[in-house]
């Protein structure tokens, strides 16, 4: 079969070009352009998967850059991880774009939206296909750009403009780490290709540093602590964007990167442990914030951060298939959650869950799919999240990380709690303000229903019912010694219990007690509540530690530039002018003065001597005679 | 080479300028047509050069060598290689586009276009001269028209800026003249030929090399500009009319960098090795300091001017690396900076012509009223902050990669500088394009066709090099490799 994988990103890029150039002319048609491109990519992705199963693999395209003796070729990587990601991204991307037709219907920049969505799809698919770090970095920044453009899509809102900037700059801080990591690999290991990472197993601290630096890039992109601050703000973007970019695909790119370099990480154990702990801390930390936030999208954003932390934790303890499995299932149910939230927002025009309630009665499809997705993320069997989350928990357990296990268990409990807090506050009970919910149009509910089917069943591909098909497919080979595929019933029972417990607490607090108890709890723990409610003041700390000092430094540097450096230049100029004025004075009064003085002295003498020049011969003779007399007289005296 | 194509390229603008002198002052249309035609033909000639250029060879091509002042061995010697060809193309392209951009000049058009074309001749001559005296002559020719172009057609503080530019650059080039004379008297037989001097440098003792290196450094560093000789730049830019700013950033700064490539490094290689660490440190300072100061600007044009200081730091850093990758990056960075920052100055001009202010706090929400302009400004800002897929990334990446091979810590600090760069460019975009529309600017028009015409070729090049860097690199790689071999640097 012919290799067509490299064409997968081409169609969305073409759709971007068409929509950005002719978007204003084709208007609504631009959605068709983008969705067709994405559908073609989906077909090609499936085709690539089939090719791969028949034994075709990665291939090289052309020479792109030359540094020194080595040349960098552009190639396409086709392996289980990429195939899986391609199919997931194109399925979700296509569905979300269809949903967007309804969600963005009345937006003035409708075609611009689809242009950016296509640009994102192209970059994301390029990122997945890149077979070397440089190409990955290029598309990595590309998806970051799309994220920036789409977060600040409604740029008239200052908060949206700021959020876009924050996202770009925060992730770029991580990216500089990635870039330096790439430099180390190029310089010390002479490679940029993922396929050669397996050879770098020498225990060099430099390589450990490179792995940690590469992880920095993943921390930025996947919004892990301490670079998580941009993701909640990114919710300023349109909801389909949040679903596609900030839940299902782009933010997972960090996890993808760690998975892509898994061999490299696992041969440098400290780096891998670093991944596990950053993931674990993030998972717990973000989950606590999600329990108190009142913005429907921000709750989901913190949930995303937490789940990404979960994936990192899974990879970090050595669970390659566990981490990637959760990456896949999470993509479906989290996209679905955001689209449900979008459907609710589209209908009642508020994001504040305190103003919602009882939406279910009017929005049956949205409500039902919302509940399905929440069950999936909470880890209730047999929904998708159960299988993958269970896999991560048992990996942590089996590899002997008791602290991480506790973190993961508490996070699971919190996850079920905050998700059902959301469900109960939004969908059930009585509405707490004047809202008039109505079901969204078919173009939105059909994608919801399709994603709901995935959210229910996709987990089964990694379950014992299907002989762990997913794990066998994604299997890495030689380094993948530790993962057992035997179901661990104790962990399964425990995680199910945690999920049920979380849901139960939420039910107790928000349905049975109708807001009374939560307020009491709040008052009881008010310092803790305030700390969590204010997101541990991380934003404020960063503002104080980094942003303001940078701005102050900038102003100071500018003053230095004007005062000291330019001041020196102007000072030199001024000194020169003063010096030249002194020189001019000297020239006029001393040099020229001397000349004039000479002239004047001559003049004075001449005034006196002129008198002697009378013109009378007798006077001259008389003077000559007296002169002679004086000479003789003097001679006589001296001689005598 | 039978047809003296380099002479044509260099002196065609001057010939056009002389014709303009004989054109009636009132006939502005004709004056503009002559200037445009001349610069357009020049651009076409330089494209012919590109097509006929043999990029596998590393020796001089299209050489012309005539005796000029035989008694002191001065030759009219022109020629190009991989180092200069990109800059020739850049100069003719920007000269043509900025000429179209000069249509909005409202007063004394005849003098303006004459001086403009004289400037073009000076710039082009600098990049093709292979005799030090000839090089110096062209170098100084550039100063005079630039002085008048800023001083007459500039903004409110034009006299100050023009004099500052003139004296600063002249002060630098005096030292360069001393260096040239030192070369002449220390060489046997006495020669001003850059190629001859390149072959015989082993003869110079280290102290003399260092002295000559410093002398040339002062001349070139002012032009680049290298910290702390950069303060003429923001003033000159702010006061200069838009097309002149474009040439100032796009071409004049490159003359300094080109000097390092053509004279300082190949002719004084031991001294060059001696000075790599200061070069790297200065490069780092330029990158970080330029970015930090740019962050503090409220004047749009000044911000772009300081961003130039920052971007030219990559040239210094790449040079300091003494590696092929670093040198390739540095040379490409000069070309890319010319394209991108040239476009940025055009874009500043567009909004200044309409809003009559450059105060970044007085815009806001222009994205709604000027969608095409917004798109352009976004693309070039992204190119400037080094977004992959656009040309700036490739050259910054290569400069940094090369310098990483030689200076780890300095490179890491410089990489952090690109975060600040992202910061101030996005902050600028936020203040100009985003947020609620400033009511005072409600009637503003989007970019017009003529302005778009000047920007589209630049954008096409920025994207082409970003997507397929070998398109540009192939011209320079052979020459750079030969230079590195001569310098005893690292093929990396």
Image (cartoon, rainbow, N blue to C red):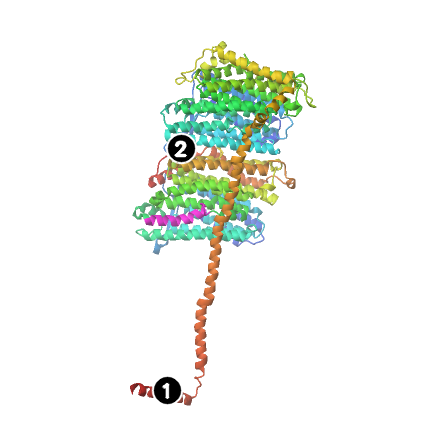
- The answer to whether B411 is drawn above or below residue B231 in the figure is above
Any magenta on residue B228?
Answer: yes
Residue B382 tag number? none
Residue visible at 30% across and 46% down in the picture:
B202
Residue nearest the viewer, comparing B223 with B262: B223
**Where's residue B68, x and y in %?**
38, 53
The answer to whether residue A343 shows anywhere in this view is: no
Residue A64 counted in the magenta span: no
Q: Residues within 10 Å of mark 1 (few under 14, many from 20)?
A: few
Residue B119 on image: x %, y %: 48, 49
Question: Label 1: chain?
Answer: A
Q: Is residue B286 visible?
A: yes
Q: Quadrant of the C terminus of chain B?
A: top left
Callout 2: chain: A
Q: Position of residue B446 (x, y in %)?
A: 61, 39
Tag 1 residue: A627
Closer to the camera in the image, B335 or B292 = B292
Give the residue pinned by disc 2.
Answer: A66
Q: Main secondary structure of the magenta part?
A: helix
Tell me which segment is drawn in magenta: B207-229
Going from N to C along the chain, the mark reached first, 2 or 1, is 2
Tag 1, which secondary structure?
helix
In front here: A614 or A629? A629
A135 or A584, nearer to the observer = A584
When the figure is inspected, residue B167 is found, relative to residue A515, above or below; the finding is below
Q: In the displayed image of the protein, which residue is found farthest to the top? A: A465
Q: Quadrant of the N terminus of chain B?
A: top left
Q: CA distance from mark 2 to mark 1?
A: 104 Å
């Amino acid at each position: 079969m012919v290799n067509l994988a490299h064409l997968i990103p081409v169609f969305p890029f073409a759709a971007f070009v068409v929509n950005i150039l002719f978007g204003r002319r084709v208007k609504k048609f631009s959605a068709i352009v983008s969705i067709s491109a994405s559908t073609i990519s989906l077909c090609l992705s499936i085709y690539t998967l089939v090719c791969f199963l028949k034994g075709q693999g990665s291939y090289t395209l052309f020479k792109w850059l030359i540094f020194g003796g080595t040349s960098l070729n552009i190639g396409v990587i086709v392996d289980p991880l990429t195939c899986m990601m391609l199919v997931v991204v194109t399925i979700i991307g296509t569905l979300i774009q269809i949903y967007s037709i309804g969600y963005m219907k009345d937006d003035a920049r409708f075609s611009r939206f689809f242009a950016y969505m296509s640009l994102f799809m192209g970059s994301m698919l390029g990122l997945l296909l890149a077979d070397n770090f440089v190409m990955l970095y290029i598309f990595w920044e590309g998806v970051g750009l799309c994220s920036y453009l789409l977060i600040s899509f409604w740029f008239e809102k200052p908060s949206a403009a700021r959020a876009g900037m924050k996202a770009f700059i925060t992730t770029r801080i991580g990216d500089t780490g990635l870039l330096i990591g790439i430099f180390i690999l190029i310089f010390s290991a002479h490679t940029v290709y993922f396929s050669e990472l397996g050879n770098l197993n020498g225990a060099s601290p430099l390589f450990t540093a490179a792995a940690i630096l590469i992880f920095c890039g993943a921390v930025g992109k996947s919004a892990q602590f301490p670079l998580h601050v941009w993701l909640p703000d990114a919710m300023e973007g349109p909801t389909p964007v949040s679903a596609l970019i900030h839940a299902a695909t782009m933010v997972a790119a960090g996890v993808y990167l760690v998975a892509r370099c898994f061999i490299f990480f696992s041969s440098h154990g400290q780096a891998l442990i670093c991944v596990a702990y950053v993931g674990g801390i993030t998972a717990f930390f973000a989950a606590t914030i999600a329990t108190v936030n009142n913005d429907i999208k921000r709750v989901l954003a913190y949930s995303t951060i937490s789940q990404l932390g979960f994936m990192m934790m899974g990879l970090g303890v050595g669970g390659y298939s566990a981490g990637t499995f959760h990456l896949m299932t999470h993509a479906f149910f989290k996209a679905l959650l955001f689209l449900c939230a979008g459907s609710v927002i589209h209908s009642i025009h508020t994001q504040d869950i305190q103003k919602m309630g009882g939406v279910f009665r009017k929005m049956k499809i949205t409500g039902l799919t919302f509940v399905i997705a929440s069950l999936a993320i909470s880890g209730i069997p047999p929904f998708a999240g159960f299988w993958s989350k269970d896999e991560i928990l048992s990996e942590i357990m089996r590899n002997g990380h008791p602290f991480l296990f506790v973190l993961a268990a508490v996070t699971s409990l919190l996850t079920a709690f905050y998700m059902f807090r959301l469900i109960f506050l939004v969908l059930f009970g009585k509405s707490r303000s004047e809202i008039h919910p109505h079901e969204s149009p078919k173009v939105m509910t059909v994608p919801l229903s399709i994603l709901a089917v995935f959210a229910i069943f996709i987990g089964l591909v990694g379950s014992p019912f299907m002989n762990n098909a997913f794990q066998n497919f994604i299997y890495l080979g030689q380094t993948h010694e530790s993962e057992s595929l035997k179901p661990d019933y104790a962990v399964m029972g425990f995680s199910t219990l945690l999920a049920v417990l979380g849901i139960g607490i939420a039910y107790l607090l928000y349905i049975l007690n109708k807001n009374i108890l939560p307020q009491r709890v709040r008052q009881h723990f008010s310092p803790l509540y305030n700390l969590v409610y204010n997101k541990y003041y991380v934003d404020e700390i960063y503002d104080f530690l980094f942003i303001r000092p940078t701005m102050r430094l900038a102003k100071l540097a500018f003053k230095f530039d004007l005062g000291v450096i330019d001041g020196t230049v102007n000072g030199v100029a001024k000194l020169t002018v003063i010096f030249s004025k002194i020189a001019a004075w000297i020239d006029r009064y001393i040099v020229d003065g001397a000349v004039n003085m000479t002239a004047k002295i001559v003049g004075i003498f001449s005034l006196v001597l002129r008198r002697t020049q009378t013109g009378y011969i007798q006077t001259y003779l008389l003077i000559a005679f007296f002169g002679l007399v004086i000479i003789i007289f003097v001679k006589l005296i001296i001689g005598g | 080479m039978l047809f003296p194509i380099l002479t044509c390229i260099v002196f065609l603008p001057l010939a056009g300028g002389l014709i303009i002198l004989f054109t009636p002052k009132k006939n502005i249309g004709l004056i503009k047509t002559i200037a445009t035609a001349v610069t357009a033909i020049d651009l076409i000639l330089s494209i012919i050069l590109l097509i006929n250029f043999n990029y596998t060879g590393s020796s001089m091509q299209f050489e012309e060598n005539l005796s000029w002042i035989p008694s002191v061995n001065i030759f009219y010697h022109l020629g190009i290689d991989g180092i200069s060809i990109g800059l020739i193309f850049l100069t003719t392209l920007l000269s043509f586009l900025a000429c179209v951009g000069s249509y909005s000049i409202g007063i004394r058009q005849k003098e303006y276009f004459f001086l403009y074309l004289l400037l073009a001749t000076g710039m082009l001559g600098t990049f093709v001269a292979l005799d030090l005296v000839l090089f110096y002559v062209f170098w100084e020719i550039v100063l005079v028209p630039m002085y008048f172009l800023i001083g007459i057609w500039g903004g409110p503080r034009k006299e100050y800026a023009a004099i500052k530019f003139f004296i600063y650059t002249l002060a630098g080039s005096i030292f360069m003249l001393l260096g040239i004379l030192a070369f002449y008297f220390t060489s046997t037989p006495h020669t001003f030929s850059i190629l001859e001097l390149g072959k015989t440098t082993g003869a110079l003792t280290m102290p003399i090399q260092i002295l000559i290196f410093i002398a040339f450094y002062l001349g070139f560093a002012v032009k680049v500009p290298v910290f702390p000789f950069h303060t003429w730049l923001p003033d000159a830019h702010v006061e200069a009319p838009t097309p002149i700013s474009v040439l100032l950033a796009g071409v004049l700064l490159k003359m300094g960098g080109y000097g390092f490539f053509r004279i300082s490094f190949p002719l004084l290689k031991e001294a060059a090795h001696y000075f790599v660490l200061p070069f790297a440190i200065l490069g780092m300072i330029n990158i970080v300091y330029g970015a930090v100061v740019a962050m503090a600007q409220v004047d749009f044009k000044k911000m772009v001017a300081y961003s130039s200081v920052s971007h030219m730091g990559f040239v210094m850093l790449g040079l300091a690396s003494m590696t092929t990758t670093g040198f390739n990056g540095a040379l490409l960075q000069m070309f890319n900076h010319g394209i991108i920052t040239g476009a940025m100055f055009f874009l500043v001009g567009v909004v200044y012509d309409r809003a009559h202010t450059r105060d970044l706090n007085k815009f806001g929400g222009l994205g709604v009223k000027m969608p095409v302009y917004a798109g352009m400004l976004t693309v070039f800002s992204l190119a400037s902050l080094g977004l992959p897929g656009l040309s700036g990334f490739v050259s910054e990446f290569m400069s940094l990669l090369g310098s990483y091979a030689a200076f780890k810590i300095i490179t890491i600090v410089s990489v952090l500088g690109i975060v600040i760069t992202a910061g101030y460019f996005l902050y600028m975009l936020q203040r100009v394009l985003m947020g609620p529309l400033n009511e005072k600017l409600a009637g503003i028009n989007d970019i017009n066709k003529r302005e778009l015409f000047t920007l589209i070729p630049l954008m096409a090049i920025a994207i082409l090099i970003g997507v397929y860097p070998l398109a540009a690199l192939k011209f320079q790689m052979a020459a750079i490799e030969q230079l590195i071999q001569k310098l005893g640097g690292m093929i990396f």
